[in-house]
Image: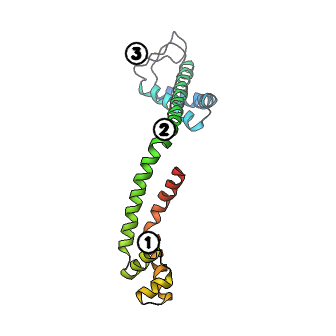
């Protein structure tokens, strides 16, 4: 069985549960502080130090450490931090690339798809209106008629037309509330 060295190079012993606990309690804060100075992000630093200790524990039976455990852990934290920083650079470069490409290709396509989806939901909402509300709404919004003109054509009072339009608008607003954010997003992306 390969063993981990916890002290000098001459003495080799396995990392036991009690020695692991002692190492963890003694070095965790130190290693966390070191990771924070390297990557300047506390949650990530905490995750890195936890991963280093997890690897130490998971590999305790096969791990051979030729230096002191403290030096080994510091080197492990350093390497994990370097990998984290490299990953962040790649991620940042990818996000910049996507941001440059998005307006040219995706916004138009996405805007068209979302616009068609919104149009479909508007038609569904219109078809769900009560008959008279739907007629009044279509005459007002699609034919561009004024309330008096609608009232004259339908033989109703202007007040009835106002009430029916108010009801139609409330019902449409309620049915389309979740799609309002999509419309705002489309306007912002294409504007």
Earlier sequence position, callout 1 versus callout 3: 3
- Position of residue 97 measured from the top left corner of the image (x, y, whole percent): 50, 34
* Residue 137 left/right relative to 78: left
Based on the displayed image, in which of its 4 quarters is residue 40 positioned?
top right
User: For the point 37% across and 62% down, which residue is it?
Assistant: 120
User: For the point 51% across and 51% down, which residue is it?
Assistant: 190
- Position of residue 112 measured from the top left corner of the image (x, y, whole percent): 42, 52
* Residue 28 left/right relative to 59: right
- Position of residue 41 measured from the top left corner of the image (x, y, whole percent): 60, 35
Q: Are marks 1 and 3 in contact (CB under 8 Å)?
A: no
- Label 1, on which residue? 142
- Position of residue 131 measured from the top left corner of the image (x, y, whole percent): 36, 80
- Label 3, on which residue? 2
Q: CA distance from mark 1 to mark 2?
A: 37 Å
Q: Are marks 2 and 3 in contact (CB under 8 Å)?
A: no
- Label 2, on which residue? 101
The single residue placed furthest to the top in the displayed view is 10
- In the image, 185 versus 61, the foreground residue is 185
């Amino acid at each position: 069985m390969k063993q981990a060295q916890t002290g000098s190079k001459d003495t080799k012993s396995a990392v036991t549960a009690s020695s692991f606990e002692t190492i963890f309690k003694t070095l965790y804060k130190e290693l966390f502080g070191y990771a924070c100075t390297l990557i300047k992000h506390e949650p990530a630093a905490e995750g890195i130090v936890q991963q280093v200790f997890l690897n130490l524990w998971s590999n305790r039976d096969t791990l051979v450490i030729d230096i002191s455990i403290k030096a080994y852990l510091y080197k492990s934290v350093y390497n994990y931090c370097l990998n984290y920083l490299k990953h962040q650079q790649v991620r940042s470069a990818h996000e910049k690339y996507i941001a440059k490409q998005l307006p040219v290709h995706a916004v138009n396509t996405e805007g068209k798809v979302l616009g068609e989806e919104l149009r479909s939901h508007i038609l569904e909402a219109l078809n769900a209106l009560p008959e008279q509300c739907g007629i009044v709404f279509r005459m007002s919004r699609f034919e561009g008629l004024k309330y008096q003109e609608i009232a004259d054509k339908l033989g109703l009072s202007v007040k009835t037309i106002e009430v029916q339009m108010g009801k139609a608008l409330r019902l449409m607003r309620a049915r389309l509330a979740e799609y309002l954010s999509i419309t705002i997003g489309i306007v912002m992306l294409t504007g």
